């Protein structure tokens, strides 16, 4: 989900020490001041290190001052030499830290880490070298080490919002989403007016599947920034995943009202409209999205699916064709168009799309896609209409025989009968019961159709329609077949 980069930069700016926030218009004056100071320091050092007029400590202090001036003027190699002079005389925490900063500026990260490590060994209570070393580890994608250093820094300075922010970022890279979210929340507690931190916490909780926490975080972000559309889009996503479809629909609508170009909100609202069987509204959102996205292939496919459901087959085929020209091997295209060809009675074309889907799904011997048994079922339905052998038994070897919808495949293979299939549909969680029963009746109906047992087929499809969820593919199948019966009036009773 895109996040406003400007907002993140503003947040980070707030988290930086005030000394870092120098105004641009002062840079020229600073450079002049640095040069003036440098011209004062260099003569004091002289050219003879054995000059008795300066003690070892005094000379070290002058080199430290000179090193800081060289660092400020971006003369990093000179600064490193200056700090080395300091460190040859005494153990100096500022010299170790500033030398590490210079090494970092030159891209010599191993030397920077070594210098920070020496600083930490010299003063284990020093926070800056811990945080800076963690930043380098994060830059090098050594996120476990980065998290460890940020954690050590936070143990010493628990009110450091910047360290919480950076540790959260590192934890995201380690897929520790809940812990990252907790860090963003803690940073937000210290920066109570910072809406982006609440937003990032919500995103992280959402990725962790902690939907109540995600909703609470997005709600807090909305209270701080009620005009930011993505706050509503993401809270709507959390509502959607929690099954609160009415709340999700309201949030997506608010996001679109705030920003008509909020593509994700339009796509998700279209999905919600489909759940409420408001396909005309879903199609309208897909149509609006096409003018906003540079990757329209999936939008064409989704709109084609809905056009197919409402019987606008000519328009649906146009959309499938458009998607095919852009992404001919999109799996969703292949499976959606496979069903479309079946409805048109173009069974050979349906078989070709099914075969290509299976070929793509099994690239690199992957297989195991949850859609695979359904593709095999539809291919079998198509081959049965053409009286062809689809080698279903061999294809079934890729499937999990313990999980639904394998009983449908087992029925098509003759391993179980119709009654056993209906019994198997009743096994499993209650939430998915209607979906399984819907599928069982629909696929039974298709087997009866292939055997020209039209009366049994009609009763099976009517059974499916009575229980199918609104968004079920099999509901569309049963609805289509019953419409064909109504047209033909050719039912064997």
Image (tube, helix red, strand yellow):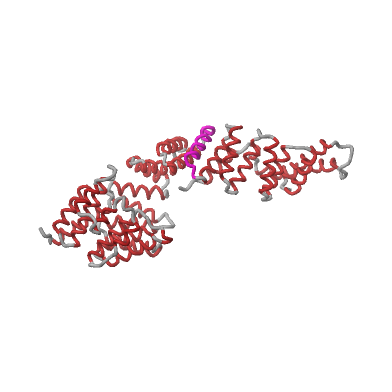
User: For the point 52% across and 42% down, which residue is it?
Assistant: 171
Q: Quadrant of the C terminus?
A: bottom left
Most frequent secondary structure within the magenta stretch: helix
The picture quadrant where one finds residue 70 is top right
Report the side of 493 relative to 108 (left or right). Answer: left
The picture quadrant where one finds residue 117 is top right
The picture quadrant where one finds residue 323 is bottom left
Q: Please check the rendered image and state whether residue 284 is part of the magenta-colored stretch, yes or no.
A: no
Q: Position of residue 140 (x, y in %)?
A: 60, 49
Q: Position of residue 76 (x, y in %)?
A: 72, 48
Q: In the rendered view, tell whether residue 355 sits above or below residue 116.
A: below
Q: In the rendered view, tell whether residue 358 sits above or below residue 179.
A: below
Magenta region, residue range:
175-192
Number of numbered discs: 0
Q: Position of residue 44 (x, y in %)?
A: 85, 40
User: For the point 37% across and 55% down, which residue is it?
Assistant: 368
Report the side of 478 relative to 293 (left or right). Answer: left
Q: Nearer the viewer, residue 11 or 372?
A: 372
Q: Nearer the viewer, residue 149 or 334?
A: 149
Q: Nearer the viewer, residue 129 or 67?
A: 129
Residue lying farthest right?
52
Q: Please check the rendered image and state whether residue 181 is part of the magenta-colored stretch, yes or no.
A: yes
């Amino acid at each position: 989900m895109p996040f406003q980069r400007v907002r993140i930069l503003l947040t980070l700016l707030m988290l930086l020490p005030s000394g870092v926030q120098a105004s641009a218009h002062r840079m020229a004056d600073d450079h002049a001041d640095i040069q003036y100071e440098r011209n004062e320091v260099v003569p004091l050092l002289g050219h003879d290190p054995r000059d008795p007029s300066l003690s070892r400590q005094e000379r070290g202090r002058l080199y430290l001052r000179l090193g800081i001036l060289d660092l400020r003027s971006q003369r990093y190699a000179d600064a490193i030499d200056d700090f080395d002079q300091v460190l040859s005389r005494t153990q100096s925490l500022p010299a170790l830290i500033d030398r590490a900063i210079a090494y970092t500026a030159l891209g010599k990260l191993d030397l920077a880490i070594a210098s920070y490590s020496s600083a930490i060994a010299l003063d284990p209570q020093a926070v800056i070298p811990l945080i800076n070393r963690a930043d380098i580890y994060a830059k090098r994608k050594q996120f476990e080490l980065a998290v460890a250093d940020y954690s050590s820094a936070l143990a010493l300075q628990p009110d450091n919002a910047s360290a919480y922010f950076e540790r959260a970022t590192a934890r995201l890279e380690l897929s520790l989403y809940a812990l990252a979210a907790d860090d963003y929340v803690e940073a937000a507690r210290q920066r109570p007016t910072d809406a982006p931190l609440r937003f990032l916490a919500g995103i992280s909780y959402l990725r962790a599947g902690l939907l109540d926490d995600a909703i609470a975080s997005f709600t807090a972000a909305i209270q701080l920034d009620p005009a930011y559309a993505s706050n509503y889009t993401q809270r709507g996503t959390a509502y959607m995943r929690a099954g609160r479809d009415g709340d999700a629909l309201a949030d997506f609508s608010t996001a679109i009202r705030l920003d008509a170009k909020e593509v994700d909100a339009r796509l998700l609202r279209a999905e919600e409209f489909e759940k409420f069987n408001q396909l005309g509204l879903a199609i309208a959102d897909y149509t609006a999205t096409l003018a906003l996205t540079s990757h329209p292939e999936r939008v064409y496919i989704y709109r084609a699916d809905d056009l197919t459901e409402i019987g606008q087959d000519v328009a649906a085929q146009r959309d499938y064709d458009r998607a095919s020209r852009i992404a001919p091997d999109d799996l969703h295209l292949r499976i959606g168009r496979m069903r479309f060809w079946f409805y048109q009675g173009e069974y050979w074309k349906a078989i070709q799309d099914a075969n290509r889907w299976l070929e793509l799904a099994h690239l690199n011997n992957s297989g195991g896609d949850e859609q695979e048994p359904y593709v095999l079922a539809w291919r079998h339905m198509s081959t049965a209409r053409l009286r062809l052998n689809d080698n279903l038994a061999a294809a079934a070897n890729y499937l999990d025989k313990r999980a639904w919808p394998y009983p449908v495949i087992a029925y098509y293979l003759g391993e179980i009968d119709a009654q056993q299939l209906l019994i198997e549909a009743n096994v499993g969680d209650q939430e998915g019961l209607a979906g399984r029963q819907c599928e069982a009746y629909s696929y039974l109906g298709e087997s009866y159709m292939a055997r020209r047992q039209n009366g049994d087929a009609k009763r099976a499809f009517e059974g499916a329609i009575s229980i199918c969820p609104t968004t079920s593919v099999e509901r569309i199948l049963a609805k289509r077949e019953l419409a064909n019966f109504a047209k033909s009036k050719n039912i064997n009773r």
